Amino acid sequence: IYKITIELTFEKFYVAGNGEWKKSASNLQARSAIDMSTEAAQQAAAEVSAQHLERWGTRTHITLWLESINMHHYVTSFQNANIDSASLLLQLKPHDLTELRVEAGDRDSLLKHLATLNSKAKITGTERYREPLWRLLQERLITPQELQMMYGVLQGAIRIPQHKREALETGLIYLTAGRVTSDTAAEVCKDVRRQAARMLGLMDQDLKRGTPDPKKEEDMKRLQDTITRALRGKYHVAYQKLSEADPKLDGTISIDEFVNRVVNMLPTGTEAKKVRRLARARDKDKKGMIDYRDFCDDFASKDTKHEKRSGNDKKSSARSKYSDSSDEGESRRRRSHS
């Protein structure tokens, strides 16, 4: 068996022992089989470009990777061996490449590229998103607070709908691959930020907080005085209204329920956003729950007038009872005297 290799510009041909011409892993068929106009193919190209190995799970990924390193003439060999994922690709050893009929010169180059992929595969978690996120931060398209929130979403510490998280991951991958602009990726981050803020009971202004705002502090103090005056002597009323939103009877309610019920107990015109800001300030553990018992103890005083009134009623009833008994004794003495 003999083999003669003939270099013809971009394509490689072999002469087999039976004298027939044979094209090795023809890339013409492989390229025609991948329709880059489809969304799936475009996403696969972006994932290959960004080397997001966890998403390499189709033959398209492997084909596009081989093309990116100018090894397109081995596409058919890899497809015949059913290598269609990054995990299988990274398990290849030198003897495996020999069985795939990879030439000696290409074998060394392919092993170097596999070593590079192995080093990328060791980067886990949110590390792969560090570069695009820092790029957005340097371009001042997101704030440091938003950067921390994006990391929280990607790590799973902040739970948002799955499709929102996948949109964030895809947007950052596309940014790394150059398929979207920084402005587009920043818009995705803003949308995720709003969703995460709602889950945490935050507002947009909190993510841009810097030095304390004296005006806001004054508004907060004025609101606290308003609540104290409105709930003076209404401890039991406030406690009952807030506890109605506590089916578990654990002494805590959500921020939304707290804001709605407190606003209804305050004078007309009180802004709900100020009450929400107060609620977030009282949410020390950032779980979105408020201990309404502590709130009532801090702002609502007990109805001392009612208690005094009850005490006076008891005294007056006792006094009237005593006077009644005295009158009855006096009349008895008068009848006895007569």
Image (spheres, rainbow, N blue to C red):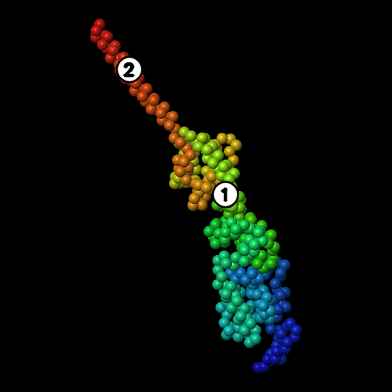
Q: Residue at x 53, y 59 (%)?
A: 157
Furthest residue to the top? 338
- Name the spot of residue 116 as percent of width and height, x first: 60, 76
Q: Residue at x 65, y 93 (%)?
A: 1
- Left or right of residue 201, residue 42 in this image: right
Number of on-image labels: 2
Residue 151's place in the image compared with 212, above or below, is below
Q: Residue at x 66, y 71 (%)?
A: 49
Closest to the observer: 333 or 93?
333
Q: Which mark is residue 212?
A: 1
Residue hosting label 2: 324
Residue 273's place in the image compared with 315, above or below, is below
Q: CA distance from mark 2 to mark 1?
A: 68 Å
- Name the spot of residue 15 as percent of width and height, x first: 70, 90
- Name the spot of residue 240 as percent of width and height, x first: 47, 38
**Badge 2 element:** helix
Specify few, some or many for label 1: CA neighbours under 10 Å numbering under 14, 14-19, or 20 or more.
few
Question: Could you say which quadrant of the image residue 64 lies in?
Answer: bottom right
- Name the spot of residue 14 as percent of width and height, x first: 70, 88
Q: In the rendered structure, which disc, 2 or 1, sits on the residue that comes first in sequence?
A: 1
Q: Examine the rendering and report whether any part of residue 13 can be seen.
A: yes
Question: Disc 2 or disc 1, which is closer to the eye?
Answer: 1
